[in-house]
Image (spheres, rainbow, N blue to C red):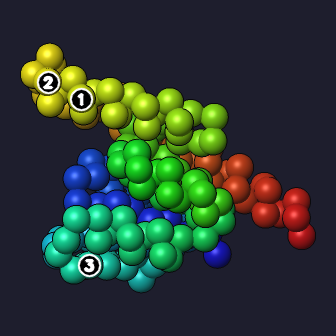
Amino acid sequence: MLHIFIDADACPVKEEVYRVAARYELLVSVVANSPMRVAEESLIELIVVREGLDAADDWIVAHVSADDIVITADIPLAWRCLEKGARVLGTTGKPFNSDNIGDAMATRELMSELRDAGTIRGGPAPFQKRDSSRFLQALDRMIGEIRRTLEDSL
């Protein structure tokens, strides 16, 4: 069964994932460092991991399989999940894949260095309504692609 993992601590699209997962009857693991409210659905589980840097990321990587979907804005986590054959979707609807993950990692490092040097301030742009719409379309498209691939392999 196709499984969706949410890197949940700062994820702005949890409710969107719940709606799409309910429509397709998909299992969702919401992975966080602290308890949080999740939809009360039988296919949605909250996983609270120990405190610590990257604990949620490590849990997701340990449990994700090929053709599962990971929802995250964390580029290093995206890289690790791609290495396991999972599909990865950013919270603004941009899929991470083998063609763009290297550039995303390089950009992340450059931006970190510029912030550390004081050349730029702040982080990513605030999440907007159009990001939610783009995310929903991309998630629906990704699920469809995985399902077709799995059906074709039968």
Instruction: Please tell me which residue is depicted at 64% across the width and 75% down the height of the picture.
Output: 1
Instruction: Please tell me which residue is depicted at 61% across the width and 48% down the height of the picture.
Output: 142
Q: If the image is split into quadrants, where does the C terminus sit?
A: bottom right
Identify the mark nearer the N-term, 3 or 1: 3
Farthest top residue in view: 119
Q: What label sits on residue 129 in the rendered view?
A: none
Q: What percent of the width, then of the height, locates residue 70?
A: 48, 58
- The alpha-carbon separation of the residues under discs 3 and 1 comes to 30 Å
Check disc 3 and report its element: helix, strand or loop.
loop
56 vs 1, left or right, is: left
Q: What label sits on residue 113 in the rendered view?
A: 1
Q: In this view, does 123 lie above or below 12?
A: above
Q: Which amino acid does label 2 sit on?
A: Ala
Q: Is residue 92 above or below residue 77?
A: above
Q: Check disc 3 and report the residue beneath it.
A: 49
In-front residue for pair 99/3: 99
The reply to whether callout 1 and callout 2 are in contact (CB within 8 Å) is yes
144 vs 19, left or right, is: right
- The alpha-carbon separation of the residues under discs 1 and 2 comes to 6 Å
Q: Check disc 2 and report the residue beneath it.
A: 117
Instruction: Please tell me which residue is depicted at 43% across the width and 31% down the height of the picture.
Output: 106
